[in-house]
Image: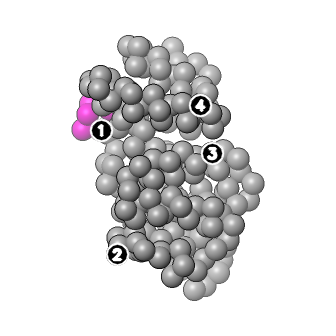
Amino acid sequence: MSSKLPSQQQQVIQTHSGLINLVADATQRSELKGKLDEVLNVSANNGWVSLVKAIRKILAGERQLDRLSGLDDEDRIIITAILNGINTPQSLPSQQAAGDPNAAAPGIAQMVYAASNGDSKALTALSIMAEQMSQAGGSMRLLAGIMKKLIDGNRDIDELSQGMDQHGQNLVISIVNELNIMNNIAL
């Protein structure tokens, strides 16, 4: 059994779809800036200083990618998606994709796998994503709460999906299956 992962760019965009949409929306709706400030403060505290600086420049009116310096590849993907979304709102990533097991599970699993193998950037990305999921409530809040268990190697689907609705359970099953594939473990 093999797994086809989305491209790195698609995974980054899926993972950060909430942030991308929030920034693009906040450029049009000033009432969202308070909520966005909270997210940006958490992001900066988690080491995403260059990304936060670039987002703040966008909020101040900057729209030229080449004027936003100091970005690594992942930051550049996020900023490009934000700028594209401001110019063409239809290009914004679906926020529903984060709950779609077929869309989100491979990306989440890859980040969990990387974090469990010492990748601090993946750990930071998971932390930010978990913060966004916890604000969504329901099964997404519960999924945010099991990230550490997944990183630590827990693959007990019943324990991990406890209290989740069917949609959340399916997402956990898909993530665990992807992790097992990455570890070459047959279920």
Kindly state the secondary structure of the residue where label 2 is placed: helix
Toward the viewer: 165 or 80?
165
Give the main secondary structure, helix, strand or loop, of the magenta stretch. helix
The three-letter code of the residue at mark 1 reads: Ser
In this rendered view, identify the residue nearer to me: 84 or 1.
Answer: 84
Q: Residue 43: x, y in percent?
A: 56, 35
Tell me which label, 3 or 2, sits earlier in the chain: 3
> In the image, which is nearer the foreground, mark 2 or mark 1?
2
Label 3, on which residue? 124
- Circle 4 residues within 10 Å: few <14, some 14–19, many ≥20: some
Q: Which label belongs to residue 44?
A: 4
Q: CA distance from mark 3 to mark 2?
A: 28 Å
Q: In the image, what residue type sits under mark 2?
A: Gln
Counting from the top left corner in percent of width and height, residue 173 is at: 47, 75
Question: In the visual, does 31 lie left or right of 183?
Answer: left
Residue where numbered disc 1 is placed: 91
Q: Earlier in the sequence, mark 4 or mark 1?
A: 4
**Residue type at tag 3:** Thr
Q: Which numbered disc flags the more N-terminal residue, 2 or 1? A: 1
Local crowd size for mark 1, using a 10 Å CA cut-off: few (<14), some (14–19), many (≥20): few
- Please tell me how crowded label 3 is: few (under 14), some (14-19), or many (20+) other residues with Cα within 10 Å: some
Magenta span of residues: 85-91
Q: Are marks 2 and 4 in contact (CB under 8 Å)?
A: no
Between the C-alphas of marks 4 and 1, the distance is 26 Å
